[in-house]
Amino acid sequence: MYQNNNLPSVEKLIQRLNAAEKSQQREIRISIQEAKDLTQELALLTTKMGNTVQEIHQLLLEMKANSSKIDVKFDGGTF
């Protein structure tokens, strides 16, 4: 399983879900504080992902612009 120390609430939730699934529980409950922590971590993760998507989009635009430019040079030569 992927481990990320920057998202302890997400990791904790995943561990609880895995344990609940193994014991065939029908539901899990989290406290309000756990929900707040989870919400904050997911908001930060979403922001980081949004920034990454913007960076990728900008790079793709630059690549597209660079690939459509053609540099043609003519040499008249000598007779």
Image (spheres, grey):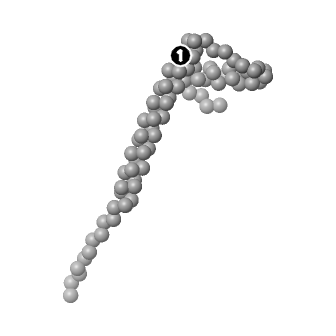
Outermost residue toward the right in this view: 24
- In which quadrant of the rendered image does the C terminus lie? bottom left
Residue 48 location in percent, x, y? 46, 32
Q: Residue at x 57, y 12 (%)?
A: 32
Outermost residue toward the bottom in this view: 79
- In which quadrant of the rendered image does the N terminus lie? top right
Q: Is residue 77 above or below residue 16?
A: below
Would you say residue 31 is visible in this rendering? yes
Relative to residue 35, is residue 52 drawn left or right? left
Quadrant hosting residue 12 = top right
Residue 44 location in percent, x, y? 47, 26
Q: Is residue 30 above or below residue 52?
A: above
Residue position marked by numbered label 1 in the rendering: 36
Outermost residue toward the left in this view: 79
Relative to residue 44, is residue 15 drawn left or right? right
Q: Residue at x 50, y 29 (%)?
A: 45
Would you say residue 6 is visible in this rendering? no
Q: Residues within 10 Å of mark 1 (few under 14, many from 20)?
A: few
Q: How many marks?
A: 1
Quadrant hosting residue 24 = top right
- The one nearer the camera, 41 or 6, is 41
Q: Is residue 45 above or below residue 36?
A: below
Residue 5 location in percent, x, y? 55, 24
Q: Residue at x 59, y 28 (%)?
A: 3
Say what amino acid the circle numbered 1 marks: Lys
Q: Residue at x 33, y 65 (%)?
A: 70
Q: Secondary structure at mark 1?
A: helix
- The one nearer the camera, 72 or 1, is 72
Q: Is residue 63 above or below residue 69?
A: above
